[in-house]
Image (cartoon, rainbow, N blue to C red):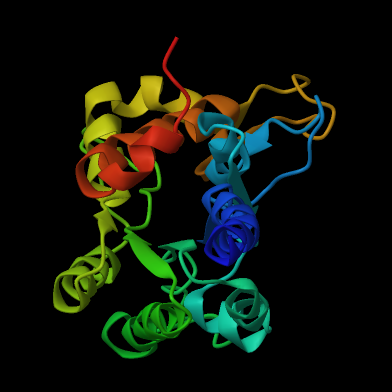
Amino acid sequence: MKTVIRFAAIVFFILPFTYTHAQKPLKIFLIGNSTMANKEYGKSNPEKGWGQVFPLYFKDNVVIENHARNGRSTKSFIDQGLWDTVINRLSSGDYLFIEFGHNDSKKEDPARYADPYGAYKTNLERFISEARKKGGIPVLLTPINRRKFDSTGAFVDTHGDYPKVVREISAAMNVPLLDLHKKSQDLLVLLGPEKSKKLYMYAEPGEFARFPEGKEDDTHFSGTGAFKVCDMVVEEMQVHLQELLPYLKDEK
């Protein structure tokens, strides 16, 4: 009888813990710049960051924490304490998606510039190492291309060595890589100079109250572009992060 009671007590205490542990939601942290960051909602603002719409791709048992901020590089993200906030919140089993490069290349701004084989490489390695110490799972994303074509209609890459560094770190530190640089370049080449405008912040004069004179922005995304980038992320996840696929909503 005592054995039965003891077994019942063990079941009583262990099962709730097991159930709670199983029900822990998947958490994905996003760190990066304005291409990923949340933008102001409203009809007057057509700009969207891809991290803003990313949660719409997942089931209810997934929490997306978007810590990306406009204008940040790996250097300023650390210097301004944004990385401290993220690493203090990161727990074992959480994913960390890392996408920088647009602002690291700005040599004219010492507060943000990070040489690709210097501070940029060091900072990315720091994000990875510190996340792993907390039991987190870092994921590297190459920077998404700006829309740029020359006078002949040929695509022009503006990111230099930054995507290459990300790929090299991925291989050296065995970190999953989502190559948005390659995928966005392929898409831009496919669409060409005119059709690709629909992905970026192009507004006609008077189309939006915020931009009465119109807007031409080849870095930041329209709603269409933000969703298209998320599609690219999911396509890369299907190859490199297959364990996350059950958390995605079923396609309709």
Residue 71 coordinates in the image, percent (x, y): 61, 65
Q: Residue at x 62, y 88 (%)?
A: 79
Q: Quadrant of residue 229?
A: top left
Residue in view at x 44 percent, y 65 percent: 100
Count of numbered marks: 0
Q: Is residue 94 above or below residue 207?
A: below
Quarter residue 8 falls in = bottom right
Residue 69 lies in quadrant:
bottom right
Residue at figure coordinates x 71%, y 45% from the top left:
39
Asked if 80 appears above or below 204 in the picture, the reply is below
Residue 170, position as x, y percentages in the image: 22, 69
Residue displayed at 59% across by 28% down = 223
Q: Is residue 37 visible?
A: yes
Front in this rendered view, residue 226 or 3: 3
Q: Position of residue 83 (x, y in %)?
A: 59, 79
Which percent across, then down, holds residue 127?
A: 44, 79
Quadrant occupied by the N terminus? bottom right
